[in-house]
Amino acid sequence: MEVVYMCAENPEIKYTQLFIDNTWVDSRSGKSFATYNPSTSDEICKVQECDKADVDIAVAAGREAFKLGSEWRTMDPSVRSKLLHKVADCMIRDINYLASVETLNCGKVFKEACGDIEFAANVFRYYAGFTDKIHGKTIPVDGDYFTYTRAQPVGVVAAITPWNYPVAMLSLKLAPALCCGNVIVCKPAEQTPLTALILASYFHEVGFPPGVVGVLPGYGPTAGAALAEHMDVNKITFTGSTEVGKLIQQASGRTNLKRVTLELGGKSPNIVFADANLDEAVESSHEAVMTNMGQCCCAGSRTFVQEQVYDEFVRRSVEKAKNRVVGNPFNDSNQHGPQIDNEQFMKILTLIETGQAEGATLECGGERHGETGFFIQPTVFSNVGDEMRIAKEEIFGPVQTILKFKTCEEVIRRANDTSYGLAGGVFTSNIDQALTVAHSLDAGVIYVNCYNIDNCGAPFGGFKMSGFGREYGEDGLKEYLEIKTVTVKIPQRNS
């Protein structure tokens, strides 16, 4: 059945408590925090604030749910699959409500929020199909022995998710972890807790056993740190900044050496050769850095353009940026909403000022849009040098920096001259050139004549300081499994 998108600018906020052991509870401290609408900077509501005491309770509930002989540990894989499908059904049933709350809380354009909900539901369905396909191997060892491996869940997983794609990022951790039979405690970003709590309600509704899923709104230095340092957490998966990723890695080393998966920042190169289809390259390069107001870890934020077409590319890119419609994200005619909060808003404007001060040419934008909320005009810089801060630092905003290059060898060297390695793009009509660049870039995901194309089945993750481990696809399951080898003495081995 085709889904009809209908937004509600003032959706009811149904859930503001912690979700622990299939129950809605207040925090032990009694503390709460405000969450805001970035389009207006107005408070939406207060949400219960988790700290270490609540983390201890949620982890203990997860440990109880994961014990040998429990309902969850003895559940047939086919039943786990049905439960995951039911969660996806709930998401599609409530897509307009979920997307409306997502738009209210993070400023994402409503129609894009609907797309995120559909994507997240597909992630649950994708991994629902894997529950009965996780298996080990039999190994022909020497001697009278029978040796096999088991792929079994790691145990209690902690997931810390960002504010830029709240439902999608949470689903990319929940679905594979549960597919493998783990239990999971989630801390959504403090800026965007509301849709995570709606998602939590579905696990109770469809019949997941108590303790299998916990959702704990709170702050990174308290709730996040408590999860990262908890001795009964077996694995932590984090999407966010490189700075915080380092802290999580350090916390694992100080405590129980819990397994860690990190999907971190990026400063991804997007390379346009003179022989590319310029219309397609301009359009894709624009969306590569403007989608979600530039708040995307794999944004193609360094646009390298070959000198023969540089001026024309800049002209067309400026035209695209000027024509991008900024405003109320609930309005279907708008393409571009606000930044998430004042901190991010000020960071972007400061970097724009730095770009001008360091000698880049501000072609358009660069200022606040409107009088309320955290809107920034789509911005384009030309004549950008590799040494400039706007070419080196992750801006995480609607700022396109366009750099000029001459040769393929030169641009590969410059593109790789960064501490990040999440994604990269190349636009060219020469397949040899495309593959040379794709194979030479130090990045985990490469797009050829397109950009930012996500698919549930294709692994995603970074090189270098963009993190390690993979999400999406069959490779994403490996992060949530332990391999156990069992060797049995037998009377006689026969071939």
Image (cartoon, rainbow, N blue to C red):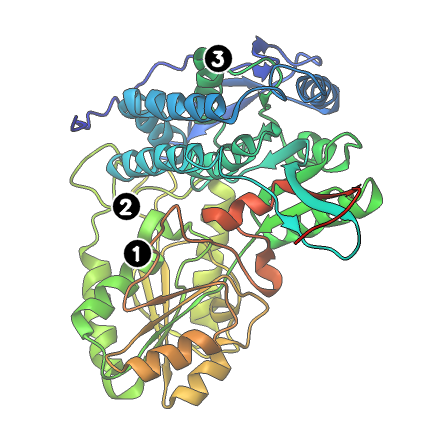
Between 24 and 307, the one nearer to me in the picture: 24
Q: CA distance from mark 1 to mark 3?
A: 45 Å
Q: Which mark is residue 207?
A: 3
The residues bearing labels 2 and 3 have C-alpha atoms spaced at a distance of 38 Å
Rendered position, 254 above or below 309:
above
Whether residues under marks 1 and 3 lie with C-beta atoms below 8 angstroms apart, the answer is: no
- Camera-nearest label, 1 or 3: 3
Quadrant in the picture for the N terminus: top left
Residue depicted at x 50% and y 61% = 422
- The residue located at (28%, 38%) in the rendering is 115
Q: Residues within 10 Å of mark 3 (few under 14, many from 20)?
A: few
**What is the crowding at mark 2: few (fewer than 14 residues within 10 Å), some, or many (at least 20)?**
many
Q: Amino acid at mark 2?
A: His
- Answer with left or right where residue 119 lies relative to residue 2: right
Image coordinates for residue 164, horizontal then vertical, percent: 44, 42
Question: Which sits earlier in the primary sequence, circle 1 or circle 2?
Answer: 2
Pointer 1 residue: 378
Element assignment for label 2: loop
Q: Quadrant of the C terminus?
A: bottom right
Residue 256 drawn at (x, y percent): 82, 40
In the image, which is nearer the foreground, mark 2 or mark 3? Answer: 3
* Looking at the image, residue 89 lies above or below residue 247: above
- What amino acid is labelled 1 in the image? Pro
- Residue 234: image x %, image y %? 72, 36
Element class at badge 1: loop
Query: What residue does disc 2 label?
Result: 336
Circles 1 and 2, Cβ within 8 Å, touching? The answer is yes
